[in-house]
Image (tube, grey):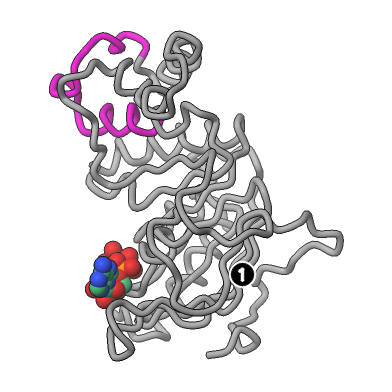
Amino acid sequence: MAASEQRVSAFSYVPRAVAPRAMISAQGVQKRYGDANGLLALENITLDIAEGEFVSLLGPSGCGKSTFLRCLAGLERPTGGSLLLDGAPINGPPEKLGIAFQRDALLDWFSILENALLPADFGGYDKKTYEPRARELLNMVGLKDFTDVYPSALSGGMRQRAAICRSLLLKPRLLLMDEPFGALDALTRDQLNVDLHHLWQQQRMTVGFVTHSISEAVFLSTRIVVFSARPGKIAEDIHVDLPDDRKLAVRDTPDFIRYTQHIRGLFEKMGLIHD
Ligand SMILES: Nc1ncnc2c1ncn2[C@@H]1O[C@H](COP(=O)(O)OP(=O)(O)OP(=O)(O)O)[C@@H](O)[C@H]1O
């Protein structure tokens, strides 16, 4: 499906008349693993992402969401098309990048505060300079009293909160998250959705977020890019026009439900879910 054939509906993303310059610009991005006969994971991905957008990638398992995220992180290279950050090709992990994955990857022999400070360590920055920010972030997500505790003493949700603080330590312009809440129970996941929404509201970093949850995507995003089955193509690019300051109760509103129904309908049409 060519970019021009992408689905357009009442929900579709329409760039604003005076659009801010794209921070990320993908033009016909293709990713094939292996040689010329290898597996085609992504085909013809074309989209621009402006600074400060919260973009979720939704789609069936194996459709290339993580592959696209890894291309954005400079951990994989597209095999076709162009992928630009601030107008320059992404040839490696960009500066000011924050990453969070499903496994929190905290280091068990460091305290929570030390874990949150690791990016300063790795980046060769003075840890003392960043300590107030690490403490502020940990405070914001309810870990104020756990800064000196080791990860093994924390629940999965608390660990993931600490991991998110770590990814935000250096004030990333771009935060890439691959199913960061996938392993958490529903209540903890709800709370972390709220926490992440608050963090995004305050810091306004650009976020690329991979999830399998339609409701999580609608709650968090300003925009949802729905991929079709492999090779991943954009099935629909949806602008989420919900209040900027979202509380969990927004999920009970007719507007929210219209979005979740619409996306479920797309997956039904793709034959991915049925009653
Ligand atoms: N390093 C790799 N080498 C070869 N094939 C790969 C590699 N990484 C991913 N793939 C394949 O590329 C396709 C897309 O994988 P990817 O992980 O990007 O999908 P996804 O949409 O994130 O899947 P899921 O939702 O299940 O996590 C899959 O068929 C996968 O097997």
Position in image of residue 113 (x %, y %) = 33, 15
Q: Residue at x 31, y 8 (%)?
A: 145
Position in image of residue 190 (x %, y %) = 37, 40
Predominant secondary structure, magenta span: helix
- Residue 272 image-quadrant placement: bottom left
- The residue closer to the viewer here, 173 or 60, is 173
Q: Residue at x 60, y 32 (%)?
A: 203
Position in image of residue 63 (x %, y %) = 35, 75
Magenta residue check for 159: yes
Relative placement, left or right, of 91 versus 85 is left
- Residue 211 image-quadrant placement: bottom left
- The residue closer to the viewer here, 121 or 184, is 121
Q: Classify 226 as above or below 180.
A: below
Q: Classify 161 as above or below 73.
A: above
- The residue closer to the viewer here, 147 or 267, is 147
Position in image of residue 135 (x %, y %) = 43, 13
> What amino acid is labelled 1 in the image?
Leu
Magenta residue check for 70: no
Residue that mark 1 sits on: 47
State which image quarter holds ligand 1.
bottom left
Q: The C terminus lies in which quarter of the figure?
A: bottom left
Task: Check disc 1 and report its element: helix, strand or loop.
Answer: strand
Q: Is residue 61 visible to the viewer in this orientation of the structure? A: no
Relative placement, left or right, of 87 versus 197 is right
Q: Classify 219 as above or below 264.
A: above
Badge count: 1
Relative placement, left or right, of 185 versus 72 is left
Q: Which residues are magenta?
A: 144-165
